[in-house]
Image: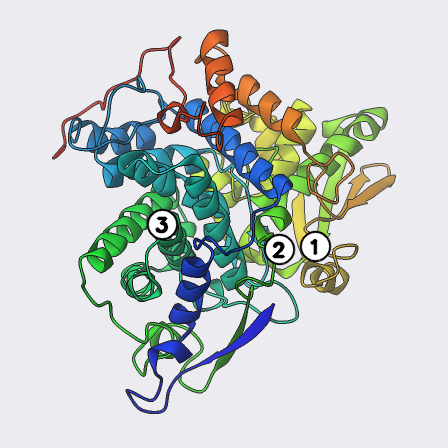
Amino acid sequence: MITHTVQVENTSGDLQPEEQLAWKIAHLASESAKPHSQTLESDVKDMVRNRIIDNAAIAIAAINEAPVVVARTKALRSEGSGGATVYGLATNRRFSPEKAAFANAVAVRYLDQDDTYLAAEYSHPDDNISPLLAVAQHMNVTGLDLIRGIVIAYEIQVALVGTGNGTGISLHEYKVDHMTHIAAATASGLGSMLKLPTEQIYNAINFAVHNSISSRQSRKGKIGSQKEYVPGYSAEIAIDAVNNAMQGLMGPNPVYEGVDSIISRFLAGPESKYTVQLAEPDKDRLRNIMITYPKEHSFEYQGQAIIDLAMQLRPEVFQNGGLEEINTIELRTSHHTHHVIGTGANDPEKIDLRSPRGTLDHSIMFAIARTLEQGEWHHERSYQNLKDNKRLSGLIKKIVTTFDQQWEDRYHSTDPSIQAFGGEIRITFRNGTVIKGEKAVANAHVYGITPWGRKDYIKKFTDLTDNLVSKSEQTRLLSSVKSLGNPKEENLHGLTAIADLNPLVNAGSQGLY
């Protein structure tokens, strides 16, 4: 691996393209597509297939949610103008790739149950899959090309987020949304998948990064629908960026190191310095996808281990008199969990059961209280019938989160045996009894007590699509995924599931589309 230093140039023109981060990313992407490049390892290709199953599961489960319905209307107007498919619809119906990618990416993100990777920045790397699949279908590439493109997208996004030892570019620290890293990764993956030269991928990255800078207000207060629309916008931006570059257009550069670039004007400023670790072409294996982690529960990733822990403590709660006997609940945890989704956010919306789902699935107080109340975490039931639930409302207000340096240190550790995204829960009852427990990582995490394999992704798919997708259609989708990469059997257009048991909802009112 090569660690690259990224800093703002003193005056415009100081850095040649080959010295810029965007070029170095583009070079890795283009070299990976050449015949002499290293063959992807079988477990890496299998993980790509797992994540395609995962995307289908969560996209179909959200198929009739209002934001997903609205996003789909955008694609429906493009029918017949491209070769891409849309989740829920028959696979012989074809749409414009950027519109299909938008609709599919929104559907995948809606439940907040897609895969995750956390370091200097936060990310859902599978945001890259929808645009790559749509363009792959439209351009009739091979399954191995698609797999490679997805692997490269994961490789680049994880590198930008950080791979340890202080590497990575933090966006959230300066209230910039993580869409910027998604767009760069998608443009890179598309370039590799389409076997574009380094210069074209470089220009695509420059276009994509420049046009994907937005604030994190999308994750504050009444979050609304912007959060799940982020990967849709990113997908469109990246696809347009690649199209522009393929037609010979030059993107704004240096997009990272320029005197008026993202780093200089939106992040740490002209005097700052970042490091990004990239695989060396033809020498290093492309395995960053293997250090990303799935979500078992439809909730912000920092809540995954905490939900598992609350489930673990629940029997003891009822052995001590139940929810009504609880006096206080304290979660000792990392800075992010406390300040972003905990009481340290000082956000009253996070303890208000009238708040939209996009706010509640970023409230650790809600996660703990709802898990203790229900004894499960369900992508639908956990968010239903909330407004008049006085017992739950009272329980949420008994929960406080506190910053704990131990958990903060573990959160930022680069040692997999130490790194943690959980915390310690202490429940105090009215009679003074205290029960407590801690959990470092979610059960499904690669270092959790039940790390996920193919059977778990399949179970998630069948559970989430039950009553929406027939058994025969579930079997067909899984067969299409299994054959991906086999030229004699693969069918890229079969990688989006059809909701054949439940009619798709149309938008309730007419917009521009």
1 vs 3, front mark: 3
The residue that disc 3 covers is 190
Query: Which residue is the extreme one toward the bottom?
Result: 10
Specify the amino acid type for callout 3. Answer: Leu
Between disc 1 and disc 3, whose residue precedes?
Answer: 3
Vertical arrangement, residue 79 with respect to residue 243, above or below: above
The residue that disc 2 covers is 338
Query: Which residue is the extreme one toward the left?
Result: 512
Taking the spot 47% from the left edge, 8% from the top edge, the residue there is 472
Residue 436, how many percent across, how many down?
83, 42
Image quadrant where residue 344 sits? bottom right
Q: Do the residues labelled 2 and 1 touch (CB within 8 Å)?
A: yes
Q: Which colour scheme is used?
A: rainbow
Q: Say left or right for 30 vs 383.
A: left
The residue lying toward the viewer, choosing from 95 and 368, is: 95
What kind of element bears circle 2?
helix
Query: Which residue is the extreme one toward the front?
Result: 36
Between disc 2 and disc 1, whose residue precedes?
Answer: 1
